[in-house]
Image (cartoon, rainbow, N blue to C red):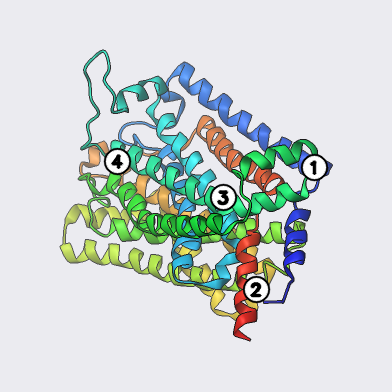
Amino acid sequence: MEKLSFQEIDNTVAATLEPPGRFYWGVVGLLFCGVLVGAFCWGWQIMVGIGAGGQNSPVNWGTYLINFVFWVGIAHSGTLISAILYLLRAQWRNPIARAAETMTVFAVCTAGLFPFIHLGRVWMVYYMLPVPNQRTLWPNFQSPLMFDVVAISTYLIVSVLFWYTGMLPDLAIIRDRATGVRKKVFSVLCLGWTGRYEHWRHYTRGYLLFAALATPLVISVHSVVSWDFALGVIPGWHTTIFAPYFVAGAIHSGLAMVLTLMIPMRKIFKAERIITMHVLESVAKTIVFTGLIVGFAYGTEYFIAWYSQNTVEMEVFSFRSTGGFALAYWIMVVCNSIVPLLFFFKRIRTHIFWLFGISIVVNIGMWFERFVIIISSVAHDFLPNAWGRYAPTAIEYGIMLGSFSLFFFFYFLFVKHLPAISMTEMKELQHQETAHE
């Protein structure tokens, strides 16, 4: 990594918080319009009923559950980069850790909306909360839906605490450089940080504690999401491979989203000296690893179906690759397992165009993976007379547009109003490199 003084690091990050121009507010306004479209479609569905979507019998789960699993997956790479790689002391994570943590928080918030949307009568969520009510009804804690409520809420709380704890020293730096109302705002946000020894001692212990607490959550949360499917008897779902399969896929999609977000931010904020090509190349190498795991899971699913000689299982997996949803299946395989192998070539994984393009391709493939898993099994289960087809409606597309707009809307606001690169961790990295010389 190029040597930077502490002052250069502070100046580079502080420059990202300068007043934005018209282009920035134009993009934010466009994203807000997308959010309004999603809100309108959701309101329309609440008014006319869940039938506004394309769900039918037997396909009772549509894009709402697809997007729920997708956004939970996106959230996982933030914890991987921030927590697990922090515990492993992988230094290449430092420049992108803050952005990854932020991505986790916003992705979990976006994912948390979809159980409400899928519920249809959203006000009935009151009966899912473990509180006394006038009808003496209590949640069914054996329901996978309750697993999601507990897992997502726990993951959100830990992720927010981890994210905010890591920002405290940087918020104090911005406070000391700010004036007027902005100084007062950051004085509140930094919680009275002065940089005393006691503050740093509590900070390092707290950050390490949250990293250790968040690490098992990476595994547990998406394993819980996989149980939504694995606990059912539907062919293609009822399998023990789902937990590690979902975790690997979640990290795969999340790492791709890290590249999708960091490459434009690196260029816009002129942070090439901090977010170096070595950092992006390390993310690309990790994507190769997770892509191989995902490809192995695809092959294992087919092997299990063949080895079991279960007629229904064999028919479902044959249908996935040759039936009505075959196009979605092959998009999934090519985008997730074959295209990432291009990162084996150094010329490709060190070229910005290829890094950005392949990251988008992987995210498209991971969305289609969730589509194939959810739709193909319920549309083609045990009885041929109950088979059906499914196609999303305009309402579902509008809500999906709103979810993506909401995620990027929050992220755009964050990178311009709060430090998106951890100055503290970059200084620690510089200090360690100097000490080893």
Q: In this view, does 361 lie to the left or right of 53?
A: right
Q: In this view, does 113 lie above or below 215?
A: above
Give whichever of discs 4 and 1 has the lower sequence position.
4
* Farthest front residue in view: 197
**Amino acid under label 4?**
Phe
Residue 278 occupies quadrant: bottom right
Q: What element carries label 2?
A: helix
Task: Decide which of 309, 130 is in the foreground and name it.
Answer: 130
Residue beneath disc 4: 147
Task: Decide which of 322, 229 is in the foreground and name it.
Answer: 229
Residue beneath disc 1: 179
Cα–Cα gap, marks 1 and 2:
29 Å
**Amino acid under label 2?**
Gln
> How far from the left and from the top, in percent, is residue 4?
73, 72
Task: Judge depth for marks 3 and 2 and give the one in front.
Answer: 2
Cα–Cα gap, marks 3 and 2:
23 Å
Give whichever of discs 4 and 3 has the lower sequence position.
3
Q: Which residue is drawn at 67% across and 41% down?
A: 187
Give whichever of discs 3 and 2 has the lower sequence position.
3
Do callouts 1 and 2 mark residues in contact (Cβ within 8 Å)? no
Give whichever of discs 4 and 2 has the lower sequence position.
4
* Farthest bottom residue in view: 437
Q: In this view, does 431 lie to the left or right of 138?
A: right
Q: Which residue is drawn at 18% across and 55% down?
A: 311
Cα–Cα gap, marks 4 and 2:
43 Å
Cα–Cα gap, marks 4 and 1:
46 Å
Task: Judge depth for marks 4 and 2 and give the one in front.
Answer: 2
